[in-house]
Amino acid sequence: MRRADRGDDLSLGSGRPVVGGRDLSLPGNDVRLAATRWAGTGTPVLLLHGLASQRRFWNLVARDLAGRPVCALDQRGHGDSDKPDEGYDLATVASDAATALDALGWSRAVVVGHSWGAAVAATLAAEHPERVLAAVLVDGGVAGPPRDEPRDVVKQRLAPPRVAVPPEDLPAMLRGGPLAPWWSADVEDAVLPIFEVGDDGLARARLTYERHMMVLDGLLDYDADAVLQRVAAPCWLVAAIGDDEWSRTKQAGLDRAWEVLARPRAFALRGALHDVPLQWPALVAGVIKAAADERQG
């Protein structure tokens, strides 16, 4: 796939880190993972993006974490990381993160995940408890898939749209979405690397449809209760709550997580979007700082 430019300031593909970030390659579980690292002092922070996203998603949050050691990871199949045709179960993806921590020289870290990444972070905290000082689950990880619907029905309902648009139309399409009131050049830089331009000149998601569905298979196996009750570290839960059915499911998951977690801290945010790290990055960064500083206290 080639990269394309619109004007002088828009490029699809790898995008740009915020000031001070250094791109590097890290080992995962038989894969190479692209990452961006920011130097600093104090408790290290590992940032895990959601399904079909990539590490630049965290740019705005990382800026508000300046001065702390931070690493944002492209998880397997996503962004600039290797794209194998297997290994998208949560245990394997969590093992990727643990291996990356080894390469960074971080024995333990605060692990932050958004959406699918929250389920990865919770799995990492459950299966590698010695590596996780605290887990921060941002609008994910507290509720498993619906159990009253056939798996194939749920999977089809969650299948991604097959977007294929001229690259010059992509920014306007994105600006017209739920993030419109909070849109900025920085948000655009954080979102555009989700896409790449093919040989036909059209922009599509960098995560292929087939791999997206493999990630969904892993996510549909996620048993939130079973995982969260094994998390010994403090677990900070940030949930975007509205008036829709999915919000009611998340609220029920949040309530249940409060019961099963050993050390829960929870925030239900009314008016927040699912992509709250792009909407209110300072708020998300504040929760991460609180999680890191609690461990230092």
Image: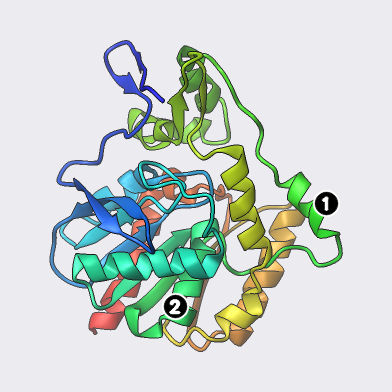
- The quadrant of the image that shows the C terminus is bottom left
Residue 129's quadrant in the figure? bottom left
- The quadrant of the image that shows the N terminus is top left
The answer to whether 206 appears left or right of 110 in the picture is: right
- Mark in front: 2 vs 1: 1
Q: Which mark is residue 137?
A: none
Which residue is denoted by mark 1 in the rendering? 153
Which residue is denoted by mark 2 in the rendering? 125
CA distance for labels 2 and 1: 30 Å
Camera-side residue of 138 and 218: 218
* Residue 115 seen in this snapshot: no
Tag 2: amino acid: Ala
Tag 1: amino acid: Val
Query: What is the x, y in percent for residue 225?
Result: 65, 79
Query: What is the x, y in percent for residue 266?
Result: 52, 73
Colour scheme employed for the rendering of this structure: rainbow
Residue at x 23%, y 81% (from the top left corner): 296
Query: What is the x, y in percent for residue 75?
Result: 42, 53
Residue at x 36%, y 78% (from the top left corner): 132
* Residue 95 seen in this snapshot: yes
Secondary structure, mark 1, is helix
Mark found first going from the N terminus, 2 or 1 = 2
